[in-house]
Amino acid sequence: MTTREQCAARDAADPLAPLRDAFVLSDEVLYLDGNSLGPLSVGARRRIIETVDEEWGRGLIRSWNAAGWMAQPTALGDRLAPFIGARPGEVVVADTLTILLAKALIGALRLRPDRHVVLTDEVNFHSDLYIAGGVAALAGRPIEIRPIDRTRLDEHLGPDVALVMLTHVDFRTGEMLDLAGVTRRVHGAGALMLWDFAHSTGAVPLDVTGADVDFAAGCAYKYLNGGPGAPAFLYVRESWQGILENPLPGWLGHARPFAFEPDYEPAPGVQAFVTSSPSVIALAALDGALEVFERTSLDEVRAKSLALTDLFIELVEERLAGVVEVVTPRDHARRGSQVALRHTESYGIIQALIARGVIGDFRDPDICRFGFAPLYVRFVDVYDAVEHLVAVIEHEEHRDPAYRTRNPVT
Ligand SMILES: Cc1ncc(COP(=O)(O)O)c(C=O)c1O
């Protein structure tokens, strides 16, 4: 069995270990929830303070021009493009993920007027399912949103399918789908592909160009550490720009916003998908949060992510065989950067772990979720987390009556 000393030796040899200093993290807490909310970074904190004190405080309205506020959505989009293998000019940062999915869904349905089915995953993140239903109601023609068992996608791909919307890494199980393979099959049926990269961006290298993805969106508050409620990003392949319409046009997606013209004319490129004023302070936070990624590569991040999750799975299987079930695939090609464990008392287990300073989260009905963000999680953290997990279960700490009532955020 791997010992704590061996884990410490792996940390000492880890090229990513120095990056932990880029985060405001206390050693009292073992943070395994960066797949849900990334921690505050030194860069984000500095950029928020600069933006508030200098740009807003002193610069006032002049900062729209002088500090480049207006260009933030596309400038940050260009910074995010390499995270998903996109080219400059193909990504824009705005709104939130659900809203961007709505924009892409409505726009894509207009590109396939002769088809009426949208396929999605029956276990997709709920917001994706809800917004798809909302989009169908707004489409102005009968649209069928069909949640399917994603392993049976080929059986559903037919001439009536306009669009397929899937989440690349499953939010519960951490299972990762085959980006290029699925996109190819969808295109083979004449349908368009929209990916949700919420649980992939910043943890897994992605290649939307190589995979010929049509549209994708993701959030910035998980592995990108952009802060709670950080604006999201939308990818529109260059060949769709000028064709895909923003169904929620607003002045900042207009070709000439300050001409105040009564008729809408979309701006060229991805700027057209901006509707409203950018959320300047939140975008500054994201800008600062991305600095740490300049000190590494996504390949290095991915290699460490797999090493951390391999170690966690190995230790859990050794120490808790028959007690918890590892739900996340062992196969590297099918694993994101989180590990999900199944236990009938998962909610209590997570609460008891949090009481010990080990922060993971619970996903209904029976999943304990642990995220392994390679920029700051150490191999000893993995070892210690498993020690705590074993102790919680052995001492039945999870059965504390205090954990019978669930918090609103689990
Ligand atoms: C897979 C997935 N899709 C969509 C969302 C919703 O994101 P937002 O709150 O930015 O709309 C989340 C949020 O965690 C998510 O995990």
Image (cartoon, rainbow, N blue to C red):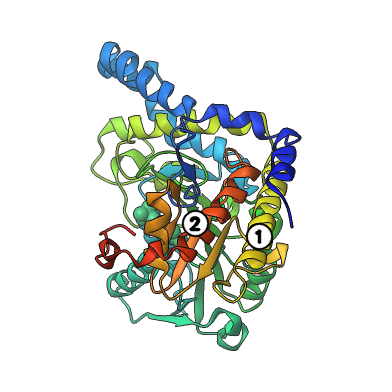
Q: Amino acid at mark 2?
A: Ile
Q: Looking at the image, do the residues carrying marks 1 and 2 touch, with CB atoms under 8 Å apart? A: no
Answer with the quadrant where ligand 1 appears in the image.
bottom left
Work out whether residue 45 can be spotted.
yes
Image: 322 above or below 194: below
Q: Which residue is mark 1?
A: 315
Q: Quadrant of the N terminus?
A: bottom right
For residue 363, which quarter of the picture?
bottom left
Q: Is residue 391 left or right of residue 319?
A: left
Q: Quadrant of the C terminus?
A: bottom left
Q: Position of residue 326 (x, y in %)?
A: 59, 70
| Mark toward the start of the polypeptide (1 vs 2) | 2
For residue 60, which quarter of the picture?
top left
Q: Residue at x 35, y 45 (%)?
A: 229
Q: Position of residue 196 (x, y in %)?
A: 50, 60
The local crowd at label 2, few if under 14, some if 14 to 19, many if 20 or more residues have their Cα within 10 Å, is: few
Query: Is 103 or 314 nearer to us in this picture?
Result: 314
Q: Position of residue 169 (x, y in %)?
A: 56, 62
**Foreground mark, 1 or 2?**
1
Separation of residues labelled 1 and 2 (CA atoms): 51 Å
The local crowd at label 1, few if under 14, some if 14 to 19, many if 20 or more residues have their Cα within 10 Å, is: many
For residue 352, which quarter of the picture?
bottom left
Q: Which mark is residue 243?
A: 2
Q: Position of residue 248 (x, y in %)?
A: 31, 54
Q: Amino acid at mark 1?
A: Leu
Q: Residue at x 45, y 54 (%)?
A: 360
The residue at label 1 has a CB less than 8 Å from ligand 1: no
SS for callout 1: helix
The single residue placed furthest to the front in the displayed view is: 395
